Amino acid sequence: NYPPHPITTNFQLMTAYPLAQSVGAVEGGVNGRTPQSLVQTSAQSWAEADIAALAKGDGRVALEPEKGDKPGPISLGAAVSAPATDAPPPAEPKPETPAGQEPPKPESRLVTIGDSDFASNGVLGVQGNRDFFMNMVNWLAQQENLIAIRPREPEDRRLTLTADQQSRIFMLSVLLIPGLVFAAGIYSWYGRR
């Protein structure tokens, strides 16, 4: 589940977190700033308190609230922003903004995800991990206009054949099929004669 936030606007792709920890906000926030959850697990999930049982891998891990397990939904990421009060003036001139709009004010932004390797090479190919990570980077850089679901790059789908397979395909497509069509034509011509 992706709660409403500029990072997750219209985001409906699946993301995967190999071994995530929950990310919880301090209740009531700090200095008037309360983080917003970015990604949550389903209601059927839970946060396991006994990590040693997970490491054993015996497959008998179950929700046991009395042992400290927390039932879902569990927040796996959060974001918070605050106005930058002591921001230095920009070095380059500000780009022109459309009439009636104010230029964006500098902000301090922070995103925390409970899994350090969800954007690593091993799982970056999962359906939404790349887009989710790029959306976070664009939000942190205050480039909200770049937050989107990017089109997929075409995959290299090569067909590897042995020499025998190549010669069989050649014989079938260049000699046998055209030969059968030619023979059917001759048969049809001879029958009409």
Image (spheres, rainbow, N blue to C red):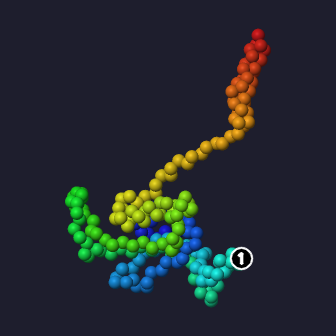
Label 1 environment density (alpha carbons within 10 Å; few <14, some 14–19, many ≥20): few
Can residue 13 be seen here? The reply is: no
Circle 1 SS class: loop
Q: Residue 9, relative to residue 81: is it above or below?
A: above
Q: Position of residue 26 (x, y in %)?
A: 43, 84
45 left or right, relative to 141:
right
The residue drawn where x is 25% and y is 75% is 86
The residue drawn where x is 39% and y is 83% is 29
The residue drawn where x is 71% and y is 76% is 58
Q: Callout 1, which amino acid?
A: Asp
Closer to us: 81 or 53: 53
The residue drawn where x is 76% and y is 10% is 193
28 left or right, relative to 97:
right
Closer to us: 185 or 124: 124
Mark 1 = which residue? 58
Q: Position of residue 78 (x, y in %)?
A: 45, 74
Tally of marks: 1
Q: Position of residue 128 (x, y in %)?
A: 52, 61
Q: Residue 159 appears in which quarter of the rendering?
A: top right
